[in-house]
Amino acid sequence: MKKDNKIFVTRPVLPPRDEFHQMCDEIFDSEWLTNMGEKHNLLETRLKEYLSVDNMSLFNNGTNALLAALKALELPAGSEVITTPFTFAATTHVIEWNGLKPIFADICPKKMVLDIESVKKAITPNTSAILAVHVYGFPCYVNELEAIAKQYGLKIVYDGAHSFNTRIDGKPISEWGDVTMLSFHSTKLFNTIEGGALIYNCESLRTKINDLRNFGFQNEVTVNDVGINGKLNEIQSAVGLLNLEILDDEIKCRMNLEQFYRENLAAIPQVSVPNFDSGESNSYQYFPILVDSDRDGLYEHLKENDIYARRYFYPLCSEFAPYRNLESAQPENLPVATNISRKVLCLPFYGRLFNDERKHDIINLIKEFYA
Ligand SMILES: *Cc1c(COP(=O)(O)O)cnc(C)c1O
């Protein structure tokens, strides 16, 4: 196969070139490139409408947004934050960067999100918050987590990098928790090249979060917080505005692709596809499968044939050098996460793949591997 024949796990949604160029001209003419410009503010308004939320602050990436979220909640220095090992490295890193201590709890086998019993067991007098992840867009057990947080006086932050527009019974997923982070990285369903946002239910967090996003400046001469530079610029906001207009078409194609995969994988007993609970909407961010036999062999077989699936999330965050010596990082503490990280495989998943004949190759290669 030719080099350009490679199929990657995703391809970025790109806006129409001419419309993007026109927006660039507007930005050049305005000479306003960043610092909460016109396109930035319009994108924030449009996204709030699209997601049916009241409070949102845009950021230049999801990681900075999550850093600011933890900072804004003013958790006691050195306190413990319960989190999942089955996620992208950024989730754990932001806890450390805030001078807090990550404590890993196990996940449940069904939806691969934090297991409630395991969270309860991890609580100590030093616990200040839970940083949970709606992994692959599967909603966490939000009501159970909320009950725990109430009982023990904990904050809840959600890493919603995979749950753009995920809903439970029609309600936006961000209605649960103190703060929810979204990532608009190029590999995510909705992208601004690099970008992200925080959504929060308590309006009083807005000033704090927006100050943290801008070096802690409250006004021209007053800095009251140890802030960062988290600002989304005008060019990236323009990409967001244009991508938002084609998002529904992208989702439709991904829905069709998901159906294609589900129908065709049903005949392969070594492979299973996790399901959403009723009332939960899929965010169409990834298409994870669980492989019962020789996941790495299948991964290599696909790769040899130019199909680049990804083993998200393998290794676990608890296996990375900065964390693997923590008591909570030991595999005995995380049996389900350890097991699932050795079974999971994310198949190529993006809108244009539905109209690509090579989607059949992916199915045939999996069948061939197990024949
Ligand atoms: C992508 C991702 C992030 C990081 O977001 P960036 O916008 O790339 O900084 C954090 N957590 C999870 C689960 C992600 O998938």
Image: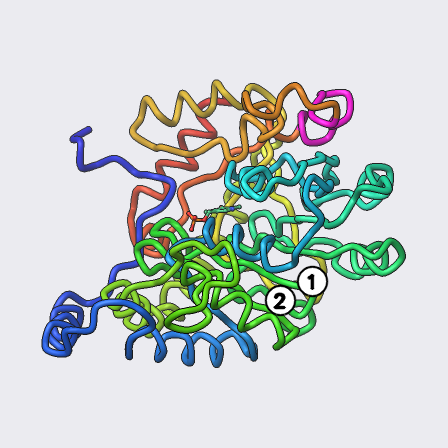
Position in image of residue 344 (x %, y %): 57, 32
Q: Which residues are magenta?
A: 328-339
Which residue is under mark 2?
A: 174
Q: Is residue 348 left or right of residue 87?
A: left
The residue tagged with tag 1: helix, strand or loop? loop
The amino acid type, in three-letter code, at marker 1 is Gly
Task: Give the residue displayed 61% in from the left and 77% down from the top.
Answer: 203
> Which element type, helix, strand or loop, lies under badge 2?
helix
Residue name at image x 73 percent, y 30 percent:
336
Picture layout, residue 370 above or below residue 3: above
Which quadrant is the N terminus positioned in? top left
Q: Horizontal and vertical percent for residue 75?
A: 69, 52
Q: Residue at x 69, y 39 (%)?
A: 78
Which class describes the residues within 10 Å of circle 1: few (<14), some (14-19), or many (20+)?
Answer: many
Q: Is residue 330 magenta?
A: yes
Q: Is residue 168 left or right of residue 7?
A: right
Residue toward you, 121 or 273: 121
**What is the distance, in whole Å, between disc 1 and disc 2 at their CAs?**
7 Å
Look at the numbered discs 1 and 2 and tell me whether their residues touch, using CB distance below 8 Å: yes
Q: Which kind of residue does numbered mark 2 sit on? A: Ser
**Residue designated by label 1:** 177
Nearer to me, 233 or 185: 233
